[in-house]
Amino acid sequence: MIKYKLKCNSRCCLDEKEFDGWFQNIEAYEKQKLHALINCPICGSADVVKSLTTPSLKKINKMKQENETNKINKTSKVNENIVFNENLKNIPTILRTLKKEIQKNSTFVGDQFVSKVRSMKQGKIREKSIYGHGTNEEIQELRDEGIDVVNVPWISDDH
């Protein structure tokens, strides 16, 4: 297992401290990063980067090193698939938890989401946490205007 120091680069976590992430190997880290499976524990953003780390090196003889390398090559693909599949099993739980937090801490504005966000940005109404509906085009327009919005998959409740 490899322990990396990770840091969230999202605007709401810029002043937060680093956090630890444990991975089977560098390939497992890179695969999870590629599929946006590494998220900030504070804000949930996938804009997480690995800090520079010093490797922990052990002195071993060359023959033992070759044997270990062969073992790792044979099992790493199996282990990566297991780790990747286990993380995929947790996604519905994570999305349900995120949905409950949004519902608890925000106001539902339905189809008025886009207009309310613009009004807040222009200072016409007080800023507060809201959630609602908008088309992909409308959401992209908000982003193009410099408004930070997040699309969250709305998963049905677990019964």
Image (cartoon, rainbow, N blue to C red):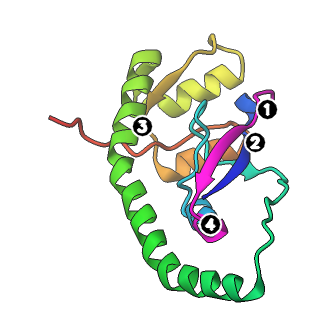
Q: Tell me the CA gap for discs 1 and 3.
A: 28 Å
Picture coordinates of residue 157 (x, y %)?
A: 23, 35
Numbered circle sitting on residue 101: none
Asked whether the residues under the numbered discs 4 and 3 touch, taking CB atoms below 8 Å apart as contact, a structural biologist would say no
Instruction: Relative to 84, say whether 114 is above or below.
Output: above
Asked whether the residues under the numbered discs 1 and 4 touch, taking CB atoms below 8 Å apart as contact, a structural biologist would say no
Q: Mark 3 points at which residue?
A: 133
Q: Earlier in the sequence, mark 1 or mark 2?
A: 2
> Could you say whether the residue bearing mark 4 is in a helix, strand or loop?
loop
Front residue of 145/77: it is 77
Q: Dividing the picture into quarters, in which one does residue 1 lie? A: bottom right
| Residue furthest top as drawn | 126
Q: Earlier in the sequence, mark 1 or mark 3?
A: 1
Residue type at mark 1 is Leu
Task: Between label 4 and label 2, give the one nearer the viewer.
Answer: 4
Residue type at mark 4 is Asn
Picture coordinates of residue 97 (x, y %)?
A: 38, 32
Q: Mark 4 points at which residue?
A: 25
Give, as a single range, the part of the protein colored magenta: 14-28
Asked whether the residues under the numbered discs 2 and 3 touch, taking CB atoms below 8 Å apart as contact, a structural biologist would say no
Picture coordinates of residue 56 (x, y %)?
A: 79, 59
Q: Name the residue under label 1.
A: 14
Q: Earlier in the sequence, mark 2 or mark 3?
A: 2
Residue 17 in the magenta stretch? The answer is yes
Q: Tell me the CA gap for discs 4 and 3.
A: 40 Å
